[in-house]
Image: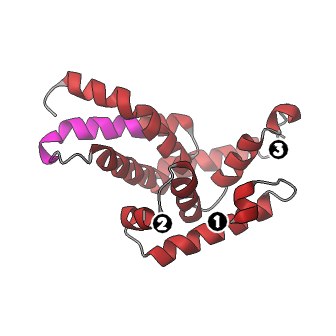
Amino acid sequence: MKSAKQLQDLMFQYTEFLIRLAYYYVKDLQAAEDIVQEVFIKFYNSRSDYEERGELKAYLTKMTINKSKDYLKSWTYRSVKLQNKLFHSGSVKRSDELVRKDEETIIGEAILRLPLKQREALIYFYFHKMTIIAIANFLAIPESTVKTRLRRGRELLREQLKGIEWEVLLNG
């Protein structure tokens, strides 16, 4: 990585993917965009540390995941979460029920409500089409742990989505 033009090309290629990934972790679009921006800044500033071996997407993905996890541990995240609970707990969010019946929206929201470990396993398996072995290698955990997280994630989704027939839940 030698020039700003090359960085711009990388950003064009990977930004949407990385924002979606960060959003799956932090559940806040603005925070996800900020995280991805920080990832690219850090990558650009430390590009001499990166040895190009054709694994750039995996490298940026890992940076994004780590930044997302750091954000979830941060005081900023905790204070925003607390403010949202205090100020929005009394107001009922009502939106057009016909629009909300869209199956992907309902399932997506249910996945975002899952604990992080189950959520990331399901996202990698179903949305990124990664194998159990690939997920285990990527997260540096045993394959049996990935299988357990997938099974538990499906169980939690079944509980949340009673009455909705989603083939993954039926056949999982």
- For residue 169, which quarter of the picture? bottom right
Give amino acid for label 1: Gly
Q: Which span of residues is magenta-colored?
A: 35-51
The residues tagged by marks 3 and 2 sit, at their Cα atoms, a distance apart of 42 Å
The reply to whether the C-beta atoms of the residues labelled 2 and 1 are less than 8 Å apart is no
Residue at horizontal 58 percent and vertical 58 percent from the top: 122
Question: In the rendered image of this protein, does residue 16 appear above or below residue 62?
Answer: above
Percent position (x, y) of residue 168? 69, 58
The reply to whether the C-beta atoms of the residues labelled 3 and 2 are less than 8 Å apart is no
Residue at horizontal 23 percent and vertical 45 percent from the top: 54
Say which quadrant the N terminus sits in. top left
- Specify the label residue 153 is tagged with: 1
Give amino acid for label 2: Ile
Residue at horizontal 13 percent and vertical 30 percent from the top: 2
Percent position (x, y) of residue 8? 28, 24
- In magenta stretch: residue 65: no
The label nearer to you, 2 versus 1, is 2
Q: Residue at label 2?
A: 132
Residue at horizontal 78 percent and vertical 46 percent from the top: 89
The residues tagged by marks 1 and 3 sit, at their Cα atoms, a distance apart of 30 Å
Label 2 sits on a secondary structure element that is: helix
Percent position (x, y) of residue 166? 76, 54
